[in-house]
Image: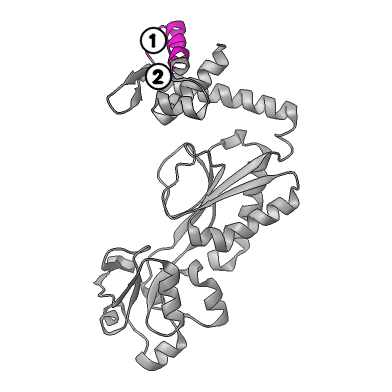
Amino acid sequence: MDRWQAMRIFVKVAETESFADTARQMFMSAPAVTRAVASLEDLIGARLLVRTTRSVKMTEAGVRYFEDCRRILADIAEAEAAAGGSYATPTGTLSVTASALFGQMYVLPIVTDYLDTYATMKAKTLFIDRPVNIVEEGIDVAVRIGHLPDSNLSAVKVGSVRRVMCGSPKYFERYGVPQSPADLENHRIAASTAAWASPEWKFGNDLRVNVDAVLQCNTNEAAIQSAREGWGLTRVLNYQIGPALVTGELQIVLSDYEEPPLPIHLLHPEGRHAPAKIRAFVDMAATRLRENRLLN
């Protein structure tokens, strides 16, 4: 086995922390994966990986070699892409992930316009409300709302969103408008457990209020619908009620007590070595999202 392929196998084992998972993902047998890593260790003269009862961990030498391998493999991929034209022209399939509602409302229109612009491209979307490891799951671009942990991923800020209290004009006519978070105990609340599971709601200046929600909904859409119908108040991210705000079906209250906005980022793992399909989508998505007044 050539050294380049052995390095690819070692990197994949280090990322998945599993010889078996690497074998499945690379369509190889488990013994072949083991032999490839062993050949590298013999060549280098150092132990790279240590098996535990539950996973595979890198040694200190393995961590250093892992970073060097990733850099070398990225350089090779860039050279091959440049030679084949994919570094200059979007080709292949683009995979994009975002939270379910944000993806459907704001990302999907960008994906379809992207496909119209680059007719040879295909795309896959994963709109889901769970953490997605974009490296392990083979995702090209992720849209993330919230503060980011430190990582090696490239991040482009494209906007921000607010956590807001809202209700319909019909509700406010009947029950009045709350003037402070403390007033919420006298109002009918529809809480989305998908967004805010704790009964303790935090507001700006570290203000905390225990909210006894009469209606608990497992989806944001259900809580928003109850507010649109005038049944009660709900608390969601402002992008989730963007169309209803524009039409006047919903209105925001307690804006003086809001927490600081949450940033929106486009993430991808390729850095400066990103192929054209990723760079083209990130450029298009950044422009479109920054132009959306509901997100900025």
Circle 1 residue: 46
> Is residue 54 one of those drawn in magenta?
no
Is 53 positioned to the left or the right of 176 in the image? left
Indicate left or right for 289 with 52 as reference: right
Toward which corner of the image does residue 45 lie, by quadrant?
Answer: top left
Q: Are marks 1 and 2 in contact (CB under 8 Å)?
A: yes
Rendered view: 90 above or below 117:
above
Identify the residue shown where x is 39% and y is 10%.
46
Q: Which residues are magenta?
A: 34-47
Could you say which is closer to the camera, residue 30 or residue 3?
A: 30
> Counting residues from the N terminus, which is met first, the one under dot 1 or under dot 2?
1
- Residue 252 visible in the picture: no
What type is the residue that disc 1 sits on?
Ala
Res 295 label? none
Rendering coords of residue 190 (x, y %):
35, 76
Residue found farthest to the front? 29
Q: Callout 2 environment at 10 Å: few (<14), some (14 to 19), or many (20+)?
A: many
The disc placed on residue 62 is: 2
Q: Position of residue 103 (x, y in %)?
A: 54, 58
Percent of width and height locating residue 137: 49, 39
